[in-house]
Image (cartoon, helix red, strand yellow):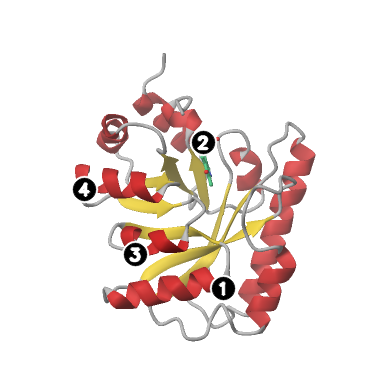
Amino acid sequence: MASIKDNLEKVTAQLPGGVRLVAVSKFHPVEELAEAYEAGQRLFGENRAQELVAKAPELPKDIRWHFIGHLQKNKVRAIMPHVTVIESVDSVELLRLIEKEAARIDRTVDVLLQLHVAQEETKSGFSVEEVLEAGEAGELTEGLPHVHVCGVMAMASLTDDMDQVAREFDLVRRTYITLKDGAFDESEYFNELSMGMSDDWQVAVKYGATLVRIGTAIFGPRKY
Ligand SMILES: *Cc1c(COP(=O)(O)O)cnc(C)c1O
């Protein structure tokens, strides 16, 4: 069986320059994260607040944690001291709360706006219409001194139909550009397009991903 180090090397060797890897370590024990760290990995993604809060103190301080799961409002305070990027902001209300909690501990936090483009209803995120409307209304840019909105994040449908996946990533990319040229035209931070997982990251990269979030292809299958 290939080691975590081998898997990391294989993936990073295929990533074009400028595309960064978030190693999605959810459900994997800290020993396995430490193995990835030893191999040079510094960006890790977790999707549950409790798990992030438990793991972060066990591992080196120069790890940059990306929160990638649905974030409940009552968990924002707990993750705030640990997280570098909250990739999964799915409402204006959550964005406001993140601002408040960041201000409370006197820090600035990077976030991405999660878009819902997949067929599954269970996935969260702004619809394309919602995010564009919020952008035009100034709700994503005004009154957020402790938040840098750095771009968008999305998941494609869980399907073998790579044409469908490509259409969804293309929609994400076009929405990102509309926001970048519109609501965020004066932002120096709005530069990130986070899309692509173990089974579809090659497609995501073709559509301009700057961050790919890969779990299974690095750590193996998760034991839930
Ligand atoms: C779990 C997860 C991933 C990684 O999925 P793999 O298929 O294991 O690569 C990426 N993004 C999000 C939001 C996830 O929850």
Q: Establish whether ligand 1 lies closer than 8 Å to the Cβ of label 4.
A: no
- 74 lies left or right of 191: left
Q: CA distance from mark 2 to mark 4?
A: 31 Å
- Image location of residue 127, percent across then percent down: 70, 63
Q: Which residue is mark 3?
A: 77
Q: Earlier in the sequence, mark 3 or mark 4?
A: 4
Name the secondary structure under disc 3: helix
- Residue designated by label 1: 92
| Contact flag, marks 4 and 1 (Cβ < 8 Å) | no
Amino acid type at mark 1: Val
Residue at x 28% of width, y 38% of height: 37
Residue type at tag 3: Arg
> Residue 196 vs residue 74: left or right?
right
Amino acid, disc 2:
Gln
| Residue receiving disc 4 | 57
Tally of numbered discs? 4
Which residue position holds label 2?
14
Q: Is residue 177 above or below residue 31?
A: below
Choose the circle earlier in sequence order: 2 or 1.
Answer: 2
Q: Is residue 174 above or below residue 166?
A: below
Q: Residues within 10 Å of mark 3 (few under 14, many from 20)?
A: some
